[in-house]
Amino acid sequence: MEFFKSSSKGKVALVASNKPDAYVLERAKKFNVPTFTFSKKEMEAGLIEEKLKQEKIDWVILAGFLLKIPESLTRSFPDRMVNIHPALLPKYGGKGMYGAHVHQAVKEAGDKETGITIHLVNEHYDEGKIIFQAATSVSAEDTPETIAEKVHALEHRYFPQVIDSLL
């Protein structure tokens, strides 16, 4: 929201979450961005699609969203739904692989690098076309927490820029 508040290419027009207590909803209020909350059942019933059409949303950008996106929603936004994953896909993707779970898996595997993957969303977890990846080194001294810090730095640096380039 900070990045796009002065963009000429696009703006954050709506923040939607399935968690009514998600901090992003508070952050959106600070930027005067409308918010919308929904349940998994409402999402599966097509409520989100209706809301996005009503609000004339062109792109759907996911960040920290863990539910599987219904195929009808991915069909409504072909090549216009983007997600970010805290690993270099195809490594550490799929159901249950998010946040700390990914960083722990990277540490346990002894990987020398990890990073972020920005990808299009399709009907399968973390299998959409890869748009962008950025890597960071992992040392033997790193913990899952320090790995998370490195990955978060990449997310904040690149995610807005990549979205801007797509617009």
Image (cartoon, rainbow, N blue to C red):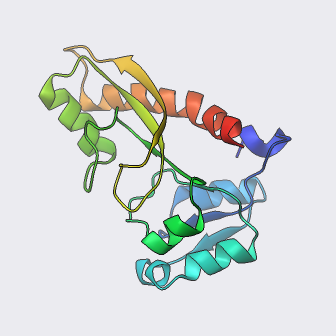
Q: Nearer the viewer, residue 149 or 68?
A: 68
> Does residue 77 lie above or below 7 as drawn?
below
Left or right for 96, reference 79: left
Say which residue appears at 34% left-offset and 55% top-offset.
125
- On the image, the x and y values in percent for residue 81 come to 56, 55
Say which of 71 and 142 sits in front: 71
Q: Is residue 105 left or right of residue 20?
A: left
Does residue 149 lie above or below 79 as drawn?
A: above
| Image quarter of the C terminus | top right
Q: Residue at coordinates 32% horizontally, 48% vertically from top-left?
A: 98
Give the mark count. 0
Residue drawn at x 13%, y 30% is 108
Q: Where in the figure is residue 3, as x and y percent of width and height?
A: 72, 38
Which quadrant holds residue 156?
Answer: top right
Q: Position of residue 58 (x, y in %)?
A: 71, 60
Dividing the picture into quadrants, the one containing residue 145 is top left
| Residue 6 coordinates in the image, percent (x, y) | 84, 40
Residue drawn at x 25%, y 40% is: 92
Relative placement, left or right, of 137 versus 143 is right
Which image quadrant for residue 44?
bottom left
